Image (cartoon, coloured by chain):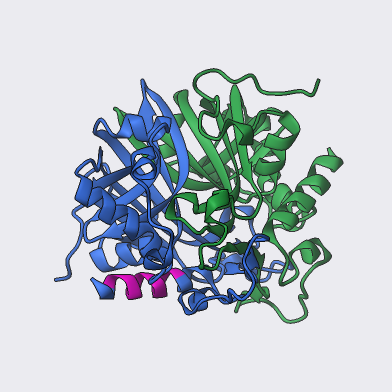
Chain colours: A green, B blue
Amino acid sequence: MTNAYHPTPRSRVKRSPTRAIYDHEKVHAILDSAMLCHVAYAIDGQPYCTPTIHWREGGQVYWHGSSASRMLRQQAKGMPVCLTVTHFDGLVLARSAYNHSCNYRSAMVFGTARLVDEPEEKRRALDAITERLVPGRAATLRPMSTQEIKATSVVVMEIEEASAKIRAENVGDDAEDGDWPVWAGVIPLVTRTGAPEPSPMLSAGIALPETLAPYRAGRRLDEVMAETYAAYAGKE
Amino acid sequence: MTNAYHPTPRSRVKRSPTRAIYDHEKVHAILDSAMLCHVAYAIDGQPYCTPTIHWREGGQVYWHGSSASRMLRQQAKGMPVCLTVTHFDGLVLARSAYNHSCNYRSAMVFGTARLVDEPEEKRRALDAITERLVPGRAATLRPMSTQEIKATSVVVMEIEEASAKIRAENVGDDAEDGDWPVWAGVIPLVTRTGAPEPSPMLSAGIALPETLAPYRAGRRLDEVMAETYAAYAGKE
C-alpha cells in the first residue's frame, strides 16, 4: 500500500474517476513541479480565486504576500481553503465536439489556512520561498529587515485531503467516428523559460550565477520546478 | 471615458492599486487570450477551485462540462462565482527577498452562474466552444447527438464586476540595494504550442487543416488565443 490521501465527498473525484489519484507521491509531484497555484476561499459567502506562488513542506503547503492583503488577513483567521495546481499540457481535438478534451495534470488540496506567526517559523518560511525557487540564492541576498518581515504574511495549510487528475493521451474518439474525415489529434502546450533579462541597474561584472543554471533558456518550467524542489528538499 | 467595470469592495484591487485595471477592453483581452481559467465556488461553506476552459460573449463568460459534474450541478442553481485567468509571464529576482516578484496578467470576474437550458442557446454555446478555439472547425465535425447535448452542461455568468492586474517590468529594487553583488533580473516564462500529434487512428490522407494554422508549433498560446478569438468574434 502506498501512502495516500483518504477522499471524502469533498475531495473524491466524481467525473472520470479512472483518472483519480490520491497517492501522496503523485499529488505532491504535481504541486512541486508548479510555481503557480490558484487559491479559492470565501468571505461572507462570496468566493474568490487568487493566483499565487505556493511551496510544500511535507504535508503542508505555504503561500505568502503582503500583510495588507485581503486574502491573507482573512485566511490568517483560520479559513477553509482549496488550493489548485494545473499543468495544462494540450488541447485534444476529436472528430466530434463531444470527445474534445484537454491533457492536464491537476491537484486540488483542501485544508484550513492559518497565519505563521511564530517568529522563527516565519523566518524559515520566508527563506524557504526563495530557496525552493532558486536553491542557494537566499544566502546571497541583502538580508531581510525587521520591517520587511513585518510587512509580509505567510500562511500555511495542513493538507487534510487532496486529489489529483491526469489526462495524458491522444484522442478518445468513438470507434464509429474513426472514418470521419477531419483531422484529430493533440496540440501540445508547454510553458518554458526564456532568456534571462538582467536588471538595467545591474553592476558591471555580475554574471548569471550558478544557482540560476536550472533556469537556462528554453527549459520546461515543470522540469525546472521539480529539479529545484528536489535540490531544496534534499538539503534539509 | 472608456467603458469600465465599477469596482465595489468585492472587486476593488487593494494591493498595488496602481496595477489595477477595470477597463472592459483590457479585462476582456486578458480573458480572451487564455484557454484555461480557474473557477472558485463554495458548497456549504467549503470553497472549491476548479480548472476549466472558458469563453466570452460580450459581457458574459461561459464554461461547460459533464452534466454529472458536481461543479456544474451546483452552479446550475445560481451561485456566486469568481472566475480567474492568469498569464504567468516571469519570475522577478531582486537583490532582496522582499522585492522578488512575478510578472503576470490576471483578471478576476465576479457574477452569478446559471445553467444554459434554453435548447437553442445551449446548441449555440456548444458550437461556440469549438469555434472560439478553432474557428471553422465546428462545421467539419461529426454532428452532436441529442444524447451528447444532454450529457453536457453549459453554464453562463453575466460579469457583474471585474478587475485585472498587470505587472510587466524588470526588478523594482530599493535604490540603496543597487550595489548589492547579486544577479537581479527577470526569467521570462512563456506557454507555447508544440508540434501537433495526430491521432494514431487518423485515416490516410488527412492533413492538418487550414483551420489549425494558428496553432503551428512554437507559437505563444496567448497570441493564438487572441487571434482565434478575434477571428471567431469577427464572424458573428
Q: Is residue B163 magenta?
A: no
Left or right placement of residue A225 versus residue B215 in this view: right
Left or right placement of residue B110 versus residue A10 in this view: left
- Residue A76: give x, y in percent of width and height: 47, 29
Disc tally is 0
- Residue A23: give x, y in percent of width and height: 71, 29
Residue found farthest to the right: A235
Name the residue: 79% across, 52% down: A227
Name the residue: 57% across, 47% down: A86
- Residue B93: give x, y in percent of width and height: 64, 62
Indicate the quadrant containing the N terminus of chain B: top left, top right, bottom left or bottom right: bottom left
Indicate the quadrant containing the C terminus of chain B: top left, top right, bottom left or bottom right: bottom left
Name the residue: 85% across, 42% down: A235
Q: Main secondary structure of the magenta part?
A: helix
In the rendered image, the vertical position of residue B84 relative to residue A57, given as above or below: below
Tell me, yes or no, if residue B162 can be seen here.
yes
- In the rendered structure, which segment of residues is drawn in magenta? B225-233
Q: Is residue B227 magenta?
A: yes
Is residue A49 or residue A12 the one in the foreground? A12
Left or right placement of residue A138 versus residue A197 in this view: right
Quarter-wise, where is residue A126 in the image?
Answer: top right
In the rendered image, the vertical position of residue A152 relative to residue A177, given as above or below: above
In the rendered image, the vertical position of residue B182 relative to residue A133, given as above or below: below
Quarter-wise, where is residue A42 in the image?
Answer: top left
